[in-house]
Amino acid sequence: GDSVTQMEGPVTLSEEAFLTINCTYTATGYPSLFWYVQYPGEGLQLLLKATKADDKGSNKGFEATYRKETTSFHLEKGSVQVSDSAVYFCALSESAVEYGNKLVFGAGTILRVKS
Amino acid sequence: DTGVSQNPRHKITKRGQNVTFRCDPISEHNRLYWYRQTLGQGPEFLTYFQNEAQLEKSRLLSDRFSAERPKGSFSTLEIQRTEQGDSAMYLCASSFRLSGRSHNEQFFGPGTRLTVL
């Protein structure tokens, strides 16, 4: 079945450091790929998405590129802030109708940013 | 607030008791999903509805679990004879499915945290 593997945390960075959180996937068909973020005490929020190979999703300074050849969707940000401290989840959703667009999540990566 | 809401936010129960959770999706969203999230893990799919029809159930959803969406609006998730292994965060999400689109964004509620003693 489909699966998502992301780097284990916690990742601890100083403010303004460069961030990379690795994510690789296994899928049957042609999935859409997502990064969700969960801030302390809040629900999951969609951070960015990409629906086909070579697409780049971006939002709030975060970027991720859909790499079909390496089955990866790594999350990057050039300069993190304390307010970026959260849990980040990589996820996929098969596009074929019969899959119902259900999301398959990775285990999550805790990011802690120190001032 | 027009987001997805879930009630209760927290539930503590004794093993063997029945519990029911409610999810109110964003108005006019025709799809509703339930996920379960245990500590240190990502959410896992349980089941989903399109309007009032339950279209898929995960093998994680044992016979003790039942979900309904009677009028295609709110949904309930019931767990009968709870076990300690049912302790988790139960998340609800909704989306608006447009035919021909490969994916429609899911909006998540804050979750119901269940603790089974």
Image (spheres, coloured by chain):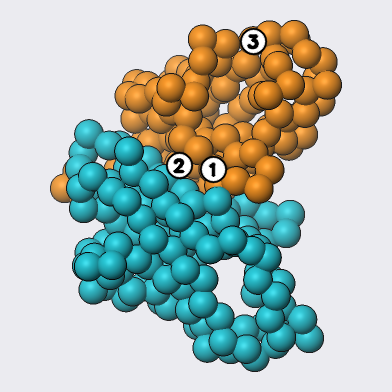
| Distance (Cα) linking label 1 and label 2 | 15 Å
Which residue corresponds to mark 3?
B80
Which residue corresponds to mark 2?
B94
Asked whether A65 or B34 is in front, the reply is A65
Discs 1/2, front = 1
| Distance (Cα) linking label 3 and label 2 | 24 Å
Residue drawn at the location 39% of the way across and 28% of the way down:
B49
Estimate the x, y position of residue B31 in percent, counting from the top left.
38, 36
Q: Residues within 10 Å of mark 1 (few under 14, many from 20)?
A: many
Q: Are marks 3 and 2 in contact (CB under 8 Å)?
A: no
Badge number at residue A106: none
Subunit of label 3? B
Residue drawn at the location 51% of the way across and 15% of the way down:
B62
Q: Is residue A13 shown above or below A90?
A: below
- For the C terminus of chain B, the image quarter is top right
Q: Amino acid at mark 1?
A: Pro
Estimate the x, y position of residue A20 in percent, counting from the top left.
51, 77
B30 to the left or right of A96: right
Q: What hue does chain B carry in this figure?
A: orange
Which label's residue is closer to the chain start, 3 or 1?
1
Q: Secondary structure at mark 3?
A: loop
Subunit of label 1? B
Q: Is residue A68 visible?
A: yes
Which residue corresponds to mark 1?
B43
Q: Is residue A86 visible?
A: no
Q: What hue does chain A carry in this figure?
A: cyan
